Amino acid sequence: MIDLYTAATPNGHKVSIALEELGLPYTLQVLDLAKGEQKLAAFLAINPNGRIPAIVDRGEGDFAVFESGACLMYLAEKTGRLIPQDAKGRSLVVQWLMFQMGGIGPMMGQANVFYRYFPEKIQPAIDRYQGESKRLFRVLDTHLQKHEYLTGDYSIADIANWAWVRTHRWSGVEVDDLPHLQRWLAAIRARPAVQKGIEMPPSKMDLTRDGEEQAKKFSEQARNLVEMGQSRKEGV
């Protein structure tokens, strides 16, 4: 049995999607980020960085894994699925997984902060992170022109990138001019395990849409979370 410590974020949904795809039994431990539950001692014993998601494999002596990419790799390698067994095939999956971890996630995350959450609009920062997110989307679109999935077969690399890219409207970045990326987004969205995974847990805000009033309320809550994190960094 796997315990999944998570919240309704792209990183959290990466792992719940993988668990659903792999058919592994798991329990959902939802942390309230706004209340700072990810900073409590009990969770810090699992993830010293105080971030979701993290998993605990009860069948392996309560073995804990933190960082979403590491969780995906652990689950794929544990089951021998969603990642090739040969060195070259595995490397291709890891490369595109790192593309998300080092590029798509951080750039879209910063676009969200400056476009949605900061009370003042710092346009150069918004332009910077939205522009870099769009550049990375173009990289995906070009690659997907000749590939059904990122590395041939559907893998944890697709799960990781999809969980973020699907929320592109929340980052203020459109994909109307990227037909291959759109095709890939729709194909993965149609998978039953993906549909269930993004509801584990469900988000209070549909990040694939841009309803003004709901978005404003959600942004205010997220802004408080960002400011709370900054206060803790500064020792306030």
Image (cartoon, helix red, strand yellow):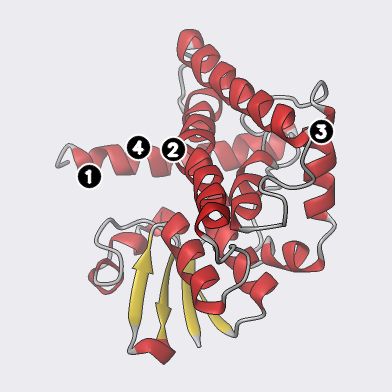
Q: Which residue is mark 2?
A: 102
Q: CA distance from mark 4 to mark 1?
A: 9 Å
Residue at the (55%, 29%) spot, across then down: 116
Q: Amino acid at mark 3?
A: His
Q: State the mark number for residue 227.
A: 4
Q: Is residue 109 above or below residue 174?
A: below
Q: CA distance from mark 1 to mark 2?
A: 24 Å
Query: Do the residues under discs 3 and 4 have CB atoms within 8 angstroms?
Result: no
Q: Nearer the viewer, mark 1 or mark 3?
A: 3
Q: Quadrant of residue 148?
A: top right
Query: Do the residues under discs 1 and 3 have CB atoms within 8 angstroms?
Result: no
Say left or right for 136 vs 61: right
Say left or right for 233 vs 62: left
Q: CA distance from mark 2 to mark 4?
A: 23 Å
Q: Earlier in the sequence, mark 3 or mark 2?
A: 2
Q: Which residue is mark 1?
A: 232
Residue 90 visible within the image:
yes
Q: State the mark number for residue 204.
A: none
